Image (cartoon, rainbow, N blue to C red):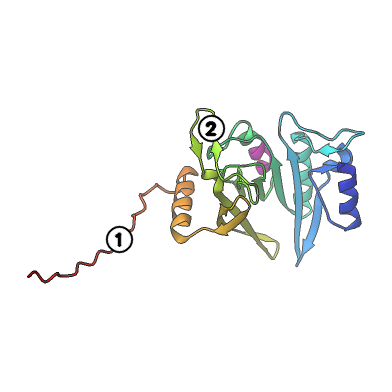
């Protein structure tokens, strides 16, 4: 099935990375030049149990950090800004979780401009490391998790909250990112957060990321109008 999918991509001239018909293809970056900006997309799968590509079979790229660190360094020397994405272990808290930190830091320290997790069902925190921006997980986009049952029986709905990161490159430089925020509705329809939802969401995550203290968001109070009543 994966080989048939890759054939469809090739026929439609759709570039792909992070997986391939074999291990060598799976580790190849996608190299783009857009308006004078040289951008490289790279990625791997850090899950402990997953269909990894081999010399003879298709699958995801394994996270061979020695290989990817060298590849990032070589591409950076050629003037590319590297966007490195992970498929990785999942957890239902702000994270990072399990072995995220080690791998994300390794590719950031090698010179990746943006390091992002594509695996998260729950939004994760962010980090600046040197010149790199790390976002450990954006959460689902269209996946139907309106809520999640934790092992202790508690039901959470934070799986509805989503980050959509818009990265800005100009004149061969990374200028930064715009954090778009959305809330999942009807199991498959993200909508932009309201101003109150966005303020609470970003305040929480900027605090968890260690950037700002968390201050309580004032709760709007209803306006009550008293109408005098004429007593008999």
Tag on residue 48?
Answer: none
Q: Quadrant of residue 229?
A: bottom left
Instruction: Indicate which disc, 1 or 2, sits on the residue closer to the N terminus.
Output: 2
> Percent from the top left, x then y, of residue 45?
74, 37
Q: Are marks 1 and 2 in contact (CB under 8 Å)?
A: no
Q: CA distance from mark 1 to mark 2?
A: 35 Å
Q: Secondary structure at mark 2?
A: loop
> Percent from the top left, x then y, of residue 140?
63, 47
Is residue 105 rendered magenta in the image? yes
Q: To which residue does mark 2 refer?
A: 150
Residue 199 versus residue 2 in the image, above or below: below
Left/right placement of residue 119 relative to residue 32 reads left
Q: Which residues are magenta?
A: 103-109
Q: To which residue does mark 1 refer?
A: 222
Residue occupying image coordinates x 79% and y 46%: 74
Residue occupying image coordinates x 39% and y 47%: 214
């Amino acid at each position: 099935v994966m080989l048939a999918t890759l054939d469809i991509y090739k026929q439609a001239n759709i570039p792909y990375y992070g997986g391939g018909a074999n291990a060598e293809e799976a580790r190849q970056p996608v190299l783009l030049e857009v308006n004078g900006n040289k951008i490289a997309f790279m990625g791997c799968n850090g899950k402990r149990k997953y269909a990894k590509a081999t010399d003879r079979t298709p699958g995801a790229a394994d996270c061979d950090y020695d290989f990817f660190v060298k590849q990032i360094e070589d591409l950076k020397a050629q003037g590319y800004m590297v966007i490195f994405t992970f498929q990785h272990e999942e957890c239902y808290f702000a994270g990072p979780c399990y072995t995220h930190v080690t791998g994300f830091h390794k590719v950031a320290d090698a010179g990746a401009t943006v390091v992002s997790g594509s695996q998260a069902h729950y939004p994760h925190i962010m980090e600046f490391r040197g010149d790199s921006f790390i976002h450990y997980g954006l959460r689902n986009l269209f996946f139907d998790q309106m809520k999640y049952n934790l092992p202790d029986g508690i039901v959470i709905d934070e799986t509805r909250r989503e980050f959509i990161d818009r990265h800005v490159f100009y004149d061969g430089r990374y200028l930064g990112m715009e954090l778009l925020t959305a809330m999942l509705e009807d199991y498959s329809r993200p909508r932009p957060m309201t101003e109150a939802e966005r303020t609470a969401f970003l305040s929480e995550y900027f605090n968890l990321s260690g950037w700002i203290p968390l201050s309580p968001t004032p709760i709007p109070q209803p306006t009550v109008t008293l109408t005098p009543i004429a007593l008999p």
